[in-house]
């Protein structure tokens, strides 16, 4: 046999060997983070009053606890009214828990358990909402702060983000307390008042708990939901955020000589700034099939097509393909790398005046594995010798650590999510930010999940027009929180 023939046989052998490895790994592949609800020993659901819970959520929406970008526009009295309403509406919960106010309007509730040796659980929901875009009020089906109940839903700003969580959490605790439930493990509720702008309430709550030496079993906040039409399977999937990205805004300033636009220099400050912004955005962070974003796809693979399962079981071979497929949408791409988004520009205040400096702001969402130092170094390398100044607008918030998908806390949360949704449960990466990031010193495991079912299209109403929550989702959330507290606090 000639050299060419031997080479051909060798190539065939290699292909067969690779195919064999792929086949074996696919056949034996098991989803990471999988959980059996039956093994979670979950509390049973108690009777609940959906009409009452929905009416109460409608009332909570009417308090205009709006966090404006300019805090001078806020109305502190609205928070005071909300707090008074909570105390009146949920008397059993307030009788059972100790209530503390931090940072003016942040709330910390403690329901002391009978066994102080057990690590407490911390449940979070913030009080504030984002403003309604000026001029868009007429596009709402119902006025955004009327809290109308119609067409099987509660309508208004905050129905989902995040008064839906706040009210249904209190509905659950009220039911348990009124029913005589006594926790063995301490339950703590943290409700920040300014999550949408600064998070000072959550920071103060975290500092208070840390000063008391509290180390929680887990923290649960908003972040992910049960996606009814997951793009990989087209079927419901419960996604629990195990991490969230960091947040940083870079300010780029191009100093320049001002003057009349009729006699411009060879390069204006605006031109220099434009080159700097393009240099940075033309050097994106590489996408990696790793971390919580990759874990989500690997966890859902057994419920997807055979091709997806094969690729997930053999990332050593198919990682580039998985990155390519995942990155087809901006949301998918954001799961795999640090994102770079220029958002604001400033130059001259008049069209015929050269600016004395031109400025741009770039918002980064930093993926786990990267840091703000890496981001700054990459930006400086991208602009090279361009005469621009780079600085953070404020101290960056680093990515959170990744919470466990093997702990007892995960088994409880994932087990309950699976039992309630009847859907696969997978970990995921929250690409936005939540108050939970400030609780990192208080617990190793911080999770982000709201037990409601939404289509991908429905998620667009969060921070948008026509925010509303179905009565079915109100029922799901009350039941979930009731079962979670009763399960976690009795172990």
Image (cartoon, rainbow, N blue to C red):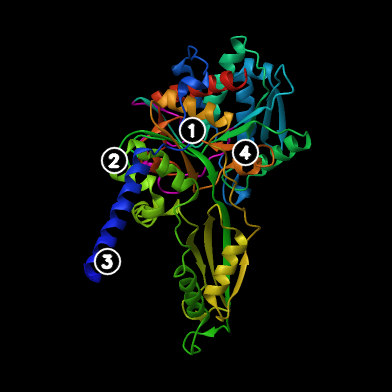
Q: How dense is the environment of label 2, judged by Cα within 10 Å: few (below 14), some, or many (20 and up)?
A: few
Query: Of the numbered discs in the image, which one, if any, rests on residue 305?
Result: 2
Q: Which residue is mark 4?
A: 193
Which one is in front in this view, the residue at disc 2 or the one at disc 3?
3
Seen at 29% across and 45% down, the residue is 307
Q: Which residue is mark 3?
A: 7
> Does residue 456 lie above or below 409 as drawn?
below
Mark found first going from the N terminus, 4 or 3: 3
The answer to whether residue 55 is seen in the rendering is: no
The prevailing secondary structure element of the residues shown in magenta is loop
Which one is in front in this view, the residue at disc 2 or the one at disc 4?
2
Mark found first going from the N terminus, 2 or 3: 3
Q: Which residue is mark 1?
A: 450
The x, y position of residue 35, in whole percent, is 47, 29
The answer to whether residue 214 is seen in the rendering is: yes
Seen at 62% across and 38% down, the residue is 193
Q: How dense is the environment of label 4, judged by Cα within 10 Å: few (below 14), some, or many (20 and up)?
A: many
């Amino acid at each position: 046999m000639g050299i060419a023939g031997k080479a051909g046989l060798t190539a065939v052998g290699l292909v067969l060997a690779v195919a064999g490895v792929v086949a074996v790994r696919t056949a034996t592949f098991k989803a990471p983070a999988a959980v059996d609800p039956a093994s979670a020993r979950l509390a049973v659901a108690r009777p609940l009053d959906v009409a009452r819970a929905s009416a109460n959520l409608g009332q909570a929406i009417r308090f205009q606890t709006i966090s404006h970008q300019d805090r001078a526009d806020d109305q502190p009295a609205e928070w005071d009214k909300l707090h008074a309403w909570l105390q009146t509406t949920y008397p059993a919960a307030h009788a059972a828990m100790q209530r503390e106010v931090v940072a003016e309007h942040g709330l910390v509730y403690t329901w002391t358990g009978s066994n102080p040796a057990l690590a407490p659980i911390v449940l979070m929901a913030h009080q504030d909402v984002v403003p309604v875009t000026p001029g868009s009020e007429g596009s709402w089906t119902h006025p955004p702060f009327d809290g109308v109940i119609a067409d099987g839903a509660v309508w208004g700003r905050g129905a989902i983000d995040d008064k839906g969580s706040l009210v249904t959490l209190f509905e659950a605790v009220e039911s348990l307390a009124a029913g005589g439930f006594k926790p063995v493990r301490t339950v703590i509720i943290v409700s920040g008042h300014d999550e949408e702008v600064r998070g000072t309430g959550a920071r103060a709550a975290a500092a208070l708990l840390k000063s008391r030496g509290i180390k929680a079993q887990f923290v649960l906040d908003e972040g992910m939901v049960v996606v009814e039409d997951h793009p990989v399977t087209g079927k419901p999937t419960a996604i629990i955020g195990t991490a969230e990205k960091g947040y940083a805004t870079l300010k780029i300033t191009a100093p320049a000589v001002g003057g009349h636009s009729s006699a411009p220099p060879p390069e204006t400050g605006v031109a220099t700034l434009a080159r700097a912004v393009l240099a940075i955005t033309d050097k994106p962070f590489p996408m990696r099939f790793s971390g919580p974003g990759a874990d989500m796809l690997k966890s859902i693979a057994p419920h997807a097509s055979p091709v997806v399962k094969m690729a997930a079981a053999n990332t050593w071979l198919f990682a580039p393909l998985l990155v390519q497929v995942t990155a087809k949408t901006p949301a998918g791409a954001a799961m795999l790398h640090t994102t770079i988004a220029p958002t604001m520009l400033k130059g001259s205040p008049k069209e015929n005046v050269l600016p004395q400096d031109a400025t741009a702001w770039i918002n980064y969402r930093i993926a786990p594995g990267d840091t703000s130092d890496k981001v700054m170094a990459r930006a400086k390398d991208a602009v090279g010798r361009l005469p621009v100044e780079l600085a953070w607008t404020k101290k960056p918030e680093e990515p959170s650590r990744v919470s466990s998908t093997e702990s007892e806390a995960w088994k409880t949360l994932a087990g309950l999510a699976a039992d309630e949704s009847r859907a696969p449960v997978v970990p995921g990466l929250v690409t936005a930010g939540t108050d939970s990031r400030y609780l990192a010193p208080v617990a190793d495991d911080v999770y982000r999940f709201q037990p409601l079912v939404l289509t991908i299209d429905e998620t667009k109403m969060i921070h948008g027009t026509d925010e509303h929550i179905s009565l079915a989702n109100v029922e799901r959330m009350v039941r979930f929180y009731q079962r979670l507290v009763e399960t976690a606090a009795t172990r």
